[in-house]
Image (tube, grey):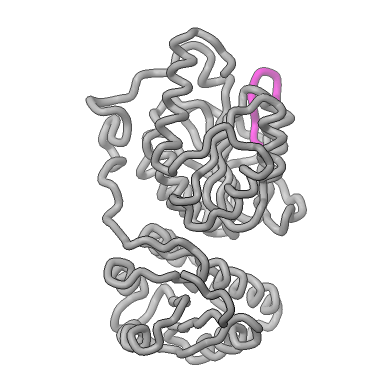
Amino acid sequence: MSTMGRKIRVLVVDDSALVRSLLTGIINRQHDMACVGTANDPLVARELIRELDPDVLTLDVEMPRMDGIDFLGRLMRLRPMPVVMISTLTERGAEVTLKALELGAVDFVAKPRVGLASGLDELAAQIVDKVRVAAVAQVRRAVAPAGAGAPGVPGAPGAAGGAAPAFLGRLSTEKLICIGASTGGTEAIRKVLLPMPADMPGICITQHMPPGFTTSFAARLNGLCQITVKEAVNAERILPGHAYIAPGGTQFHLARSGANYVAVVDDGPPVNRHKPSVAVLFQSAATVLGPNALGIMLTGMGSDGAAAMRQMKDAGSYNYVQDEASCIVFGMPREAIAHGAADEVLPLGQIAPALIARLRAETGRGHHRI
């Protein structure tokens, strides 16, 4: 969708009149966007979408008559369009938000707390940034999530015919995989992790996400994947067959303790405006892992981690970058490619198979370096 040369037209859908008014004011104060209408429930919104043809929808997660998730599911099947979810900062809100991202929402932002002036400017900046990103995002018609990966099915997303072949020797303990992602990344990460067999090398993940949401994100993935997925905890050992997600609102990097790799989770300052930042994880990978690292850069806005991924490559890492056609937003992958950080640029669905095949080939040769 092109919004070049004209304002981004936004439709606000929220059951709170005060929140509708607040969001309308935030949007209308921007030089490049306009709130063209508001709706207090999805049934009204459905008519306004037909009438106003907005570029972006902001959608409350929980509303009367038809909840935001039911409405989003129908919308993405029948008239796909960029949607930014307005989410409550609760465990329930996080669960519903992750479902919305699975259904095709571009991104989410915390719901404004009416009457709370502190932090409103920062929240306003987040909302307008995410509306701008949504306006240029590649939105796809929703399809049913792949059945592969059903909990409790041995080898479900792995190789046909049952459990995937094992990685032998010390490879799975020497290697580590580092993944960075932002806008569109929750679904991209899910698609990368689903095919991973249970004895993969450890996986460290930084996804731009606020506090409170990464706990639910890790739990959701853990219920789908053959590997164990959890939030990273400071000073814990990075184990094969495990994926560790940077907790929202922290910085996550790697260190060595004897022969082991360990997680470092701390309250470091934002880097590239992000906390967690992909650059922090990738810089530590370049220093600590060297040629024992494998890097993956997935969909996301901006350039966080691109220069650090080049540092990884210079230190001997082998790096995969998601291609433009399969990205929701091609910002971070484009910048990684521009920095010369990519060894392979692949569609999202080919990244995990390529990485697994590379590890298996290396195992078959009996070496410990790729």
Q: Residue furthest right?
A: 269
What is the quadrant of the C terminus in the image? top right
Q: Residue furthest top?
A: 366
Where are the magenta residues, as a range?
256-265
Q: Is residue 151 toward the left or the right of residue 261 in the image?
A: left
Residue 83 drawn at (x, y percent):
44, 71
- Residue at point 74%, 53% (across, down): 271
Residue 158 drawn at (x, y percent):
32, 31
Q: Is residue 329 above or below residue 9?
A: above
Q: Is residue 14 toward the left or the right of residue 279 in the image?
A: left
- Residue at point 43%, 44% (across, down): 348
Q: Is residue 257 magenta?
A: yes
Camera-side residue of 236 and 288: 288
Specify whether residue 265 is in view.
no
Q: Is residue 268 above or below residue 349?
A: below
Specify whether residue 12 is in view.
yes
Q: Residue furthest left?
A: 161
Q: Is most of the magenta stretch helix, strand or loop?
A: strand
Q: Is residue 287 toward the left or the right of residue 50 in the image?
A: right
Q: Is residue 16 above or below residue 165?
A: below
- Residue at point 33%, 24% (across, down): 164
Q: Is residue 121 toward the left or the right of residue 196 in the image?
A: right
Query: What is the tally of numbered marks visible in this picture?
Result: 0
Residue 20 drawn at (x, y percent):
51, 87
Q: Is residue 231 above or below residue 115?
A: above
- Residue at point 58%, 20% (across, down): 174
Q: Is residue 42 magenta?
A: no
Residue 60 drawn at (x, y percent):
44, 77
